[in-house]
Amino acid sequence: MAPPASSIQFIDTALSCTSPHALSYPDPKQKWLIRKHLLSLIQDYPSFTPSTDTFTHNNGTAVNLLNVTGELRVSRYTPHVPLTIWLHEKYPYMPPLVFVLANSMTPIHRDHPFVDLSGSTSSPYLQTWIFPRCNLIDLVRNLVRIFSRDHPFIYGSAVASFTHPSLVSKMEALDRLSGMLHYDMTAFLVKNEEELEDLSKLQEELIKRETITRNMISSLEQEKSSLKDKVTRLVDEADVVMNWLRVNGANSAAVGEDEAEAFEAADEESKLKIECFSADWAIEDLIYALDKAVEEGAVPFDAYIKQVRVLAREQFSYRAMLLTRSIQNDCSSMVAIGQYNT
């Protein structure tokens, strides 16, 4: 079937047009090849219509190019694929620029291996374009095979049945391999993103645990410092007792086996003070022992609170008694001084 006369006339007129509407194909031989390839394409695929327009490359260069627009029927059960094929200013030595025309009713498959969301199409045939082996007719046939397996308007991969490897051409095998690699890569990237998200959550958890551990270490260091101070204070008090024993050693030895009598109070007031001080310190030691027992889990917290409250009241009574005795003694001393002065 010969191409329509209107298409032939349009192509001839466009290629012969001179400035300022001349196309960006300066070589006459190049124009002859373009005419030949376009007419062959329109003859086999009459749905394509030629036209001219300004094409802007990614680098901003604007050129006047020929293009054909039409619909590809890839199977009986899927919608047609509208295409625009632009002939590069260096065609046929550079591959044509192919775009799938999408709309809101037929959006492009998001993970298509050969068509991005803008409609720009790149297949192994285009990527390995070499003239004169490659041409427009074979390109469109290659696109029909690709879209029959992975339709650009179908969500999800439409996988066709595979024929025996010996019956598949090298280009078709390369197309299938590229498609499978694309889907494998997509699945791998999704899996990597999930793993990265899990690792990110684990990192956040480890940071929280690190903060808790640092706080625990700081608390333990403070407790260690407090215990060192308490040990130093006890050592100093022990030195005071040892010095007292050295000075009063003879008297304490004379007492015999009952060494407790060496600390016998001189009067009832002193005896009461010693008993209060002893009880106060004993309660202080008992509360410290209870603290340790709670930390080790040997004593339940509610029992600890009840016992500490009882001990605190008892300790308060002893300290209050000491304070009362001290105030009374101060008052007595002041009265005695006043009488003496009188």
Image: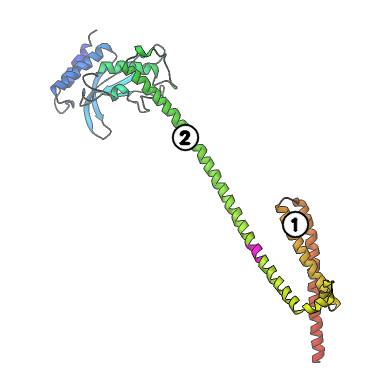
User: Horizontally, is 118 left or right of 228 in the view?
Assistant: left
Q: What is the C-alpha distance between the residues marked 2 and 1?
A: 52 Å
* Residue in the foreground of this view, choosing between 240 and 341: 240
* Residue in the foreground of this view, choosing between 210 and 139: 210
User: Horizontally, is 288 left or right of 81 in the view?
Assistant: right
Residue 88, position as x, y percentages in the image: 23, 26
Residue at x 14% of width, y 27% of height: 19
Regarding residue 340, the answer to whether it shows in the image is yes
The amino acid type of the residue labelled 2 equals: Glu
As helix, strand or loop, the secondary structure at mark 1 comes to: helix
Quadrant housing residue 26: top left
Residues in magenta, as a range: 225-230
Image quarter in which the N terminus is found = top left
Closest to the camera, between mark 2 and mark 1, is 1
Quadrant housing residue 235: bottom right
Q: Residues within 10 Å of mark 2 (few under 14, many from 20)?
A: few
The amino acid type of the residue labelled 1 equals: Leu
Q: Which residue is label 1 attached to?
A: 290
Residue 199, position as x, y percentages in the image: 51, 39
In the image, residue 276 above or below residue 311: below
Q: Main secondary structure of the magenta part?
A: helix
Residue 286, position as x, y percentages in the image: 77, 60
Residue at x 62% of width, y 62% of height: 225
* Residue in the foreground of this view, choosing between 236 and 12: 236
Q: Which residue is label 2 attached to?
A: 193
As helix, strand or loop, the secondary structure at mark 2 comes to: helix
